[in-house]
Image (cartoon, helix red, strand yellow):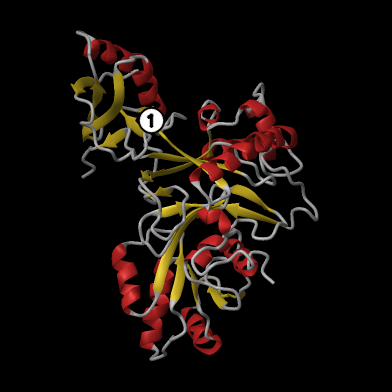
């Protein structure tokens, strides 16, 4: 029997989803210092990154926010350095697992970044998102995520098995064979990218083959616009999206309410100003930073590079965890200006020099090779000469000259952009 089956209700995967906000926060903050101590003691990378950190004292979000953010490019750099040095495994010191029975699989993501696969049931915690999408124990799921190199196929398969479902490993490509298998095996639904599901449905229509049992889908891996969601619904398929990564597993998932994505129960999520580790105000767009409670791959304050924002209130389905708006773009907004790279961290470093500055945005305009920098700054009680002093800081930090405009608080767009590239590329 599925281990969660006794806890399942008609609407929730388990009782964790409907616990009070205070109960959840207390449980997460109790688990956090233990996870930090585990990461320090069992991974080379976090023994270094968190050197000097007293893990038992990191038991609040404010304390967590003082720890450094580890971004994907740093993970890649550590992995490459370890490989170049002839290290015994390729994970840059971030994995608490070693090759052998405890790590049955290794996966590769573009970069190349390698991820360990563990033995725990539902290792990436995907069953929760599948349940929210309408899948139930005893059903057959047609899984069209890749089973080669990347973990996507395995992520979904292990989640389906934890839910108590059978999986057809369709993988990618071979559209006619996918249609034939769906018609003959009669799965309850599809898991894969939304674009490939559309291709399959179109091909089935061309082949004059109906797929009446395919009435639900869980999609991920790319944008899922409302227009495609509605197109699928018109053909009898209720499709829901989830947000997950190879490093972290499930981060958030869509519910029947169709109001943003609900955070998974196994992660601690912060939204920070791009280029920094500083949490933004609730509702402000920023970079998603995730701390996973996975002991095998214990990533602490891992910067996803993706932008999102917290939605107010709770999900109408009764799930009480925080909701986010979903994917809203990339946080890495590094640009090249007159031969010099400028990145969000530099914009943040300039703003930090002036207590009056609430928010800053660098706008690059003009044409390539003839571009200009315009620094827009929200400030309150700005003293005379603040714009000139900010201009000096711009030159000091970026080695470039830029104009400065002081604007009223709340004037800058809430879109997560620290650097706006408005140049003409014609």
Left or right: residue 41 versus residue 297 is: right
Q: Residue at x 20, y 21 (%)?
A: 406
Left or right: residue 415 versus residue 154 is: left
* Residue topped by disc 1: 344
Residue furthest to the right: 101
Q: Is residue 389 above or below residue 24?
A: above
Q: How many marks?
A: 1
> Where is residue 363 drawn, in percent x and y?
25, 31
Q: Secondary structure at mark 1?
A: helix
Q: Is residue 211 above or below residue 82?
A: below
From the viewer's side, name the closer residue of 307 and 139: 139
> From where the camera sits, is residue 163 visible?
yes
> Where is residue 92 drawn, in percent x and y?
66, 39
From the viewer's side, name the closer residue of 10 and 360: 10
Quarter of the figure that contains the N terminus: bottom right
> From where the camera sits, is residue 343 visible?
no
> Where is residue 174 drawn, in percent x and y?
50, 78
Q: Residue at x 65, y 56 (%)?
A: 123
Left or right: residue 124 versus residue 241 is: right
Q: Quadrant of residue 13?
A: bottom right
- Crowding at dot 1, Cα within 10 Å, few <14 / some 14-19 / many 20+, comes out as many
> Where is residue 175 drawn, in percent x and y?
47, 79
Left or right: residue 278 versus residue 422 is: right
From the viewer's side, name the closer residue of 117 and 213: 213
Q: Quadrant of residue 288?
A: top left
Q: Residue at x 51, y 48 (%)?
A: 20
Q: Quadrant of residue 375?
A: top left
Q: Is residue 397 above or below residue 9?
A: above
Quarter of the figure that contains the C terminus: top left
Residue furthest to the top: 384
Q: Residue at x 43, y 78 (%)?
A: 215
């Amino acid at each position: 029997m599925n281990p969660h089956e006794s806890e399942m209700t008609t609407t929730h995967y388990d009782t964790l989803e409907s616990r009070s906000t205070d109960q959840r926060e207390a449980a997460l903050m109790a688990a956090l210092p233990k996870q930090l101590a585990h990461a320090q003691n069992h991974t080379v990378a976090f023994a270094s990154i968190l050197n000097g950190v007293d893990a038992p004292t990191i038991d609040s979000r404010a304390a967590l926010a003082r720890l450094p953010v580890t971004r994907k490019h740093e993970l890649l750099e550590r992995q490459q350095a370890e490989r170049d040095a002839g290290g015994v495994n390729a994970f840059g010191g971030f994995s608490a697992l070693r090759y052998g029975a405890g790590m049955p699989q290794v996966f590769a993501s573009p970069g190349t970044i390698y991820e360990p696969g563990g033995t725990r049931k539902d290792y990436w915690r995907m069953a929760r998102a599948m349940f929210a999408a309408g899948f139930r124990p005893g059903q057959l799921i047609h899984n069209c995520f890749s089973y080669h190199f990347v973990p996507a196929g395995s992520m979904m398969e292990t989640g389906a098995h934890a839910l108590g479902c059978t999986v057809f490993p369709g993988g990618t490509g071979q559209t006619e064979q996918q249609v034939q298998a769906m018609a003959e095996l009669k799965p309850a639904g599809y898991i894969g990218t939304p674009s490939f599901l559309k291709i399959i449905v179109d091909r089935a229509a061309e082949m004059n083959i109906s797929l009446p049992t395919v009435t639900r889908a869980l999609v991920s891996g790319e944008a899922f616009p409302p227009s495609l969601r509605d197109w699928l619904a018109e053909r009898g398929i209720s499709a829901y999206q989830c947000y997950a990564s190879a490093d972290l597993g499930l981060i958030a998932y869509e519910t029947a309410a169709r109001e943003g994505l609900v955070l998974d129960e196994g992660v601690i999520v912060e939204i920070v100003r791009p280029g920094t580790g500083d949490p933004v105000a609730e509702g402000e767009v920023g970079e998603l930073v995730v701390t996973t409670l996975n002991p095998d791959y214990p990533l602490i304050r891992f910067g996803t590079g993706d932008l999102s924002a917290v939605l107010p209130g709770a999900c109408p389905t009764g799930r009480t965890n925080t909701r986010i708006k979903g994917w809203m773009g990339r946080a890495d907004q590094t640009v090249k200006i007159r031969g010099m790279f400028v990145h969000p961290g530099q914009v943040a470093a300039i703003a930090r020099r002036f207590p009056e500055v609430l928010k800053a945005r660098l706008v690059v305009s003009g044409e390539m090779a003839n571009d200009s920098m315009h620094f827009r700054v929200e400030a309150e009680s700005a003293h005379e000469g603040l714009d000139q002093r900010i201009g000096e800081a711009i030159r000091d930090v970026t080695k470039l000259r830029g104009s400065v405009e002081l604007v009223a608080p709340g004037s800058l767009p809430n879109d997560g952009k620290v650097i706006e590239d408005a140049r003409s590329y014609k």
